[in-house]
Amino acid sequence: MEATIIDGTAVSRDLRARLLGELAAVRSSKVDPGLASVLVGEDYAAHAYERRLRRLAENVGCRFQPERLPHDAELAEALATIGKLNADPRISGILVLRPLPAQLSEVELYPTLDPLKDVEAVHPANAGLMARGTPRFVPSTPASCFWLLDDYFRQTGRDPSTALRGKTVVIVGRSHNVGKPAVWLALDRGAIVVSCDEHASEAGRLAEFTRQADVLIVAAGSPGLVTGDMVKEGVIAIDVGINPVEGEDGRVHLVGDLDFDSVAQRAEALTPVPGGVGPVTDVWLVRNAVLAGVMQHTTLSIGPWPLF
Ligand code: NAD
């Protein structure tokens, strides 16, 4: 049977419409949310992400403030930028774009974010709430993976609140922003969860685990890492990877961590790159900035978008 291609762009359109409605309601209560990004250096993917966010924020009418620092910025400079954004009442949400250059450590930067503006839940307090299953903010990328899964389960007649119970979910990649919070979301759903990072590959054991996955989430940043022979028949595969690759024509295009064609031959469903997880992530992030604005400035009651 041919695999279903999960259309993240279509899902993101619905979410965008929902976000526009919420923004209108929020503004009538005098909340004016703003998202700031902090980008250090010249990473291609980080710049592309900043551009996408700017476009989306402008389209929905949310303030967007991109902060840029040179690749050799010292810790003090990065801390000063975060401090300035923490203190700015026009900014409700702050995103520190990755990757960071070697001299800046996530461990030193994240705890300095105002937890009420930490829309990616990387501050230890927010990561703790997330790990406990009571998130203040659900970080945008893992949220988007599970939003797409929930939507697909609904469309195929399964109840998303129970669909993963007793199923094996394998997550490749263990970053603070993506892999680990995806593990926590899968645990909350009663799944049997396996987390693999680069050491699983180095030990030659990655395929041993990816082949067990009923649902496979790959967020490693390694083009075509998972091939068709590494998945079982009927897997649902979510590809988070965004890897710039130079084509034969010399132009850069984006590919995922799945070897799309070979995985599609065995999968029940999978997400493409581009057009899968990415567009939903963007809307989710801007929405988290709106949620943060509401938390900071009103007694209005809106919570995280319910994942199922
Ligand atoms: P990261 O570099 O912080 O973490 C990568 C993780 O993958 C690490 O845990 C590492 O050990 C693991 N890994 C690397 N190579 C591996 C291998 N060969 N086998 C197994 N595990 C391996 O990256 P990140 O921020 O988590 O992002 C991962 C990918 O997702 C990148 O391509 C990034 O551009 C992309 N991304 C996409 C979105 C989106 O919205 N689609 C959002 C964030 C990140």
Image (cartoon, rainbow, N blue to C red):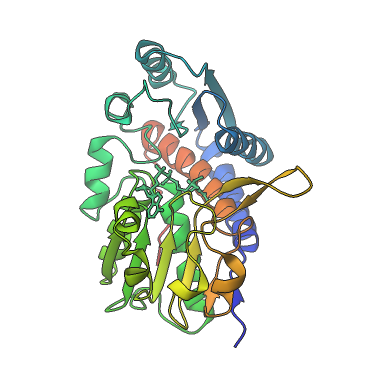
Tell me the quarter of the picture where residue 306 sits.
bottom left
Image location (x, y in percent) of residue 57: 61, 37
Q: Which residue is at a point 47% across and 33% down the rendered structure image?
A: 97
Q: Is residue 9 left or right of residue 195?
A: right
Q: Residue furthest right?
A: 249
Q: Quadrant of the N terminus?
A: bottom right
For this rendering, which residue is in front, 234 or 50? Answer: 234
Q: Residue 125: image x %, image y %? A: 23, 37
Residue under the image location 34 percent in, 51 percent down: 198
> Residue farthest to the bottom?
1
Q: Across the whole image, how many numbered discs are drawn on residues?
A: 0
Locate the C terminus by quadrant: bottom left
| Residue appearing at x 29%, y 77% in the figure | 165
Q: Pick the residue in front: 16 or 260.
A: 260
Give the quadrant of residue 163. bottom left
Give how far across and how far down residue 161 sits, in percent.
Answer: 35, 73
x then y, percent, for residue 237 = 48, 69
> In this image, 152 relative to 295: left or right?
right
Q: Is residue 33 left or right of residue 121?
A: right
Residue at image coords 31%, 45%:
136
Residue in front for this viewpoint, 143 or 174: 174
